Image (cartoon, helix red, strand yellow):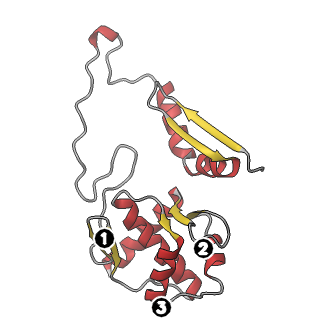
């Protein structure tokens, strides 16, 4: 695939879902959101049995209530917290447990997953690469020579934007990364 710009625009009657960026980025995001997109398209084509068949009789559904901790949204995402693993205050996230792993590479990836999940839960999508590097050093799992390659190798879970060697590199979770982070955090929170 080339690095030319690509764009996906999905409307579903102007609910819209738009992704733009390099072809590789857009392809990765389509793959990450594939199940949700297909489900939305399939449900759009099914006639609803709950709604009246005539537009004159249509009554909009009531607005959604905020989710309680542990409750799933209609899209399957949880409103979770993991107080035994993450201390979250405003937009500040601290990891308060040691991350598991059989080697420093696995511990580094787990540190990134947990921290990025915490940041995402407070509305921060992208985190600087240096911030994650510093956390790995605090966790005692930083392999400074292989750190970048380690995180780049976890591309199923992490999206890293920015040029090689750049101080402005950022890191964020893919949808499988969110799921893996939640599994990890649930396990650690229960210990």
Query: Which mark is first along the chain, 3 or 2?
Result: 3
Disc 1 secondary structure class: loop
- Residue 87: where, in percent of width, then height? 28, 75
For residue 52, which numbered disc appears in the image? none
Task: Depth check: give the residue in front, 166 or 93.
Answer: 166
Residue designated by label 3 = 140
Decide if residue 180 is on the left or right side of residue 73. right
Residue at point 47% right, 66% down? 127
Q: Quadrant of residue 98?
A: bottom left
Mark 1 burial class by Cα count in 10 Å: few <14, some 14-19, many 20+: some
Residue name at image x 70 percent, y 47 percent: 23
- x%, y% of residue 167? 57, 71
Q: Which residue is mark 1?
A: 82
Residue 62 horizontal/vertical position (percent): 22, 31
For the residue pair 4 and 39, the one nearer the viewer reads as 4
Label 3 SS: loop
Marks 2 and 1, how far apart in space? 23 Å
User: Where, by quadrant of the figure, is residue 170 drawn?
Assistant: bottom right
7 vs 69: above or below: above
Where the C terminus falls, by quadrant?
Answer: bottom left
Q: CA distance from mark 2 to mark 3?
A: 16 Å
Q: Residue furthest front?
A: 167
Q: Are marks 2 and 3 in contact (CB under 8 Å)?
A: no
Asked whether 159 or 103 is in front, the reply is 159
Closer to the eye: label 2 or 1 = 2
Residue 93 vertical position relative to residue 20 in the rendered view, above or below = below
- Label 2 residue SS: helix
Q: Earlier in the sequence, mark 2 or mark 1?
A: 1
At label 2, counting other C-alpha atoms closer than 10 Å, the crowd grade (few under 14, some 14-19, many 20 or more) is many
Residue 151 numbered mark, or none: 2
Query: Among all residues in the image, which is located at the extreme right?
Result: 2
């Amino acid at each position: 695939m080339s690095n030319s710009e690509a764009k996906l625009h999905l409307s579903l009657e102007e609910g819209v879902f738009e992704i733009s960026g390099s072809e590789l980025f857009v392809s990765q995001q389509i793959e990450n959101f594939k199940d949700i997109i297909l489900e939305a398209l399939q449900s759009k084509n099914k006639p609803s049995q709950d709604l009246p068949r005539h537009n004159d009789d249509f009554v909009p559904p009531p607005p959604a209530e905020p989710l309680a901790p542990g409750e799933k949204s209609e899209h399957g995402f949880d409103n979770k917290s993991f107080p035994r693993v993450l201390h979250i205050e405003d937009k500040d996230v601290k990891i308060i447990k040691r991350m598991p792993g059989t080697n420093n590479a696995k511990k580094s990836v787990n540190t990134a997953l947990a921290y990025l999940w915490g940041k995402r839960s407070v509305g921060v999508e992208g985190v600087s690469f240096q911030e994650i590097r510093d956390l790995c050093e605090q966790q005692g799992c930083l392999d400074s020579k292989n750190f970048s390659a380690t995180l780049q190798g976890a591309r199923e879970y992490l999206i890293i934007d920015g040029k090689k060697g750049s101080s402005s590199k950022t890191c964020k979770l893919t949808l499988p990364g969110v799921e893996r982070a939640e599994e990890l955090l649930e396990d650690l929170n229960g210990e």
